[in-house]
Image (cartoon, grey):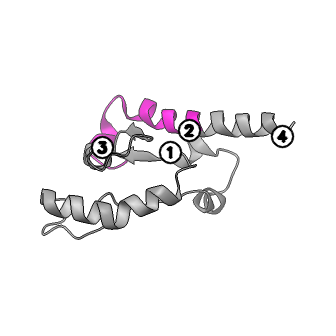
Amino acid sequence: FILNLCWPELSFEEQMRKTWMTESVLCSAPVESGPVRAACERTCGKRYLLPQIELLSNCVIAALGAKARDRMRALGIESFIPAVAAAPPGCNLKEAKSSWKAIADEIHRRNAACHASLE
């Protein structure tokens, strides 16, 4: 759904070529979807997530879910769109679709600006 908002005219394969997905910690939690120690979040975030974000700094970056949003902020990353998680229970919240639309709106805004600068 989110990819179709961002690139409705493209096939799934083409959409995925324009998408980079990663975890906000990139280190295993002791229990799936369970808590991760703050020290682990900081260390793994600095070592793995931050370098990825720096490489993608010109891209639209979204954090899906409160954990991802909070981890991005804790790393000092300010330029991202906080959005509702794409998985349950977050995806069932009434504000989910509007938060995902904000991602697509930013992609469309940047594409329009890019095309305008080429004209």
Give, as a single range, the part of the protein colored magenta: 86-106
Name the quadrant of the C terminus: top right
Percent position of residue 65, x then y:
31, 45
Q: Earlier in the sequence, mark 2 or mark 3?
A: 3
Disc 2 element: helix
Inter-mark Cα distance, 4 to 2: 21 Å
Question: Would you place residue 47 above or below residue 96 in this image?
Answer: below
Is residue 13 shown left or right of residue 81?
right
Q: Earlier in the sequence, mark 1 or mark 4?
A: 1
Query: Are the residues flagged by discs 1 and 3 in contact, CB closer than 8 Å?
Result: no
Query: Are the residues flagged by discs 2 and 3 in contact, CB closer than 8 Å?
Result: no
Question: Would you place residue 48 above or below residue 104 in this image?
Answer: below
Is 87 colored magenta in this rendering? yes
Residue highlighted by disc 4: 118
Disc 4 element: helix
Residue highlighted by disc 1: 2
Which residue is nearer to you in this view: 32 or 66?
66
Numbered mark located on residue 83 in the image:
none
Residue at (61% x, 58% y) in the render: 12
Query: Are the residues flagged by discs 2 and 1 in contact, CB closer than 8 Å?
Result: yes
Query: Are the residues flagged by discs 3 and 4 in contact, CB closer than 8 Å?
Result: no
Disc nearest the viewer among 1 and 4: 4
Numbered mark located on residue 104 in the image:
2
Residue at (21% x, 59% y) in the render: 41
Residue highlighted by disc 3: 73
